């Protein structure tokens, strides 16, 4: 059975030299081999979505010259916000809400439902209104 499992491996370049098999074990194929059937030829296309194209190391960023295409003016930085998710009780215990804020947010969201609080960097005020 061990040989059947090892014969069923789909090799993946991202797993070479990282696992004993160098790929993914295909349990259905191992059973197929165990029943005496010939192994199915693997798909010639590399099924490894983790292995990026070595020509383009960052396929998500189409323009490596501009690291932030959304903000065309790097001299005018966007304000930085801190975002914390938690229940009204968690926010109250952490000091992000005072007692009145705790009652208001608890009435608005419920006391056990999670919601985000936002704070502009350098400010002491937390709000549930998301920054634009």
Image: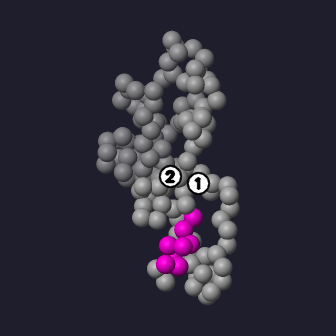
Residue 75 at what x, y percent from top left?
51, 12
Residue at the spot of label 1: 48
Q: Earlier in the sequence, mark 2 or mark 1?
A: 2
Q: Tell me if I can see residue 10 in this picture.
A: yes
Residue 56 at what x, y percent from top left?
60, 34
Residue at the spot of label 2: 14
Q: How is the image coloured?
A: one colour
Horizontal side, residue 55 vs residue 122: left or right: right
Main secondary structure of the magenta stretch? helix
The residue lying at 45 percent from left, 38 percent from top is: 83
The residue lying at 50 percent from left, 52 percent from top is: 14
The residue lying at 62 percent from left, 25 percent from top is: 63
Of the pair 113 and 7, the residue shown nearer to us? 7
Q: Is residue 6 magenta?
A: yes
**Residues rendered magenta in the picture:** 3-10
42 lies above or below 50: below
The residue lying at 60 percent from left, 41 percent from top is: 53
Of the pair 35 and 56, the residue shown nearer to us? 35
77 lies above or below 94: above
19 lies above or below 55: below
Characterize the local packing of mark 2: few (<14), some (14-19) or many (20 or more) Cα atoms within 10 angstroms.
Answer: some
Q: For the residue labelled by badge 2, is the local secondary structure a helix, a strand or a loop?
A: helix
Horizontal side, residue 20 vs residue 67: left or right: left
Residue 70 at what x, y percent from top left?
61, 24
Q: Tell me if I can see residue 111 in this picture.
A: no
Residue 96 placement: quadrant: top left
- Circles 2 and 1, Cβ within 8 Å, touching? The answer is yes
Of the pair 107 and 130, the residue shown nearer to us? 130
Q: Is residue 31 magenta?
A: no
Q: Residue furthest top?
A: 75
Q: CA distance from mark 2 to mark 1?
A: 7 Å
62 lies above or below 93: above
């Amino acid at each position: 059975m061990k040989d059947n499992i090892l014969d069923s491996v789909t090799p993946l370049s991202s797993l070479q030299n990282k696992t004993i098999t160098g790929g993914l074990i295909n349990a259905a194929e191992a059973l197929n081999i165990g029943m005496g059937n010939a192994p199915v030829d693997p798909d010639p296309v590399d099924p490894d979505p983790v292995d990026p194209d070595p020509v383009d190391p960052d396929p998500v960023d189409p323009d490596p010259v501009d690291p932030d295409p959304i903000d065309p003016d790097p001299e005018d930085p966007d304000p930085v916000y801190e975002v914390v998710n938690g229940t009204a009780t968690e926010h109250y215990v952490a000091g992000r809400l005072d007692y009145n804020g705790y009652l208001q947010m608890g009435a608005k969201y419920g006391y056990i439902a999670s919601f985000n609080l936002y704070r502009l960097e350098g400010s002491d005020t937390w709000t549930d209104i998301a920054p634009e």
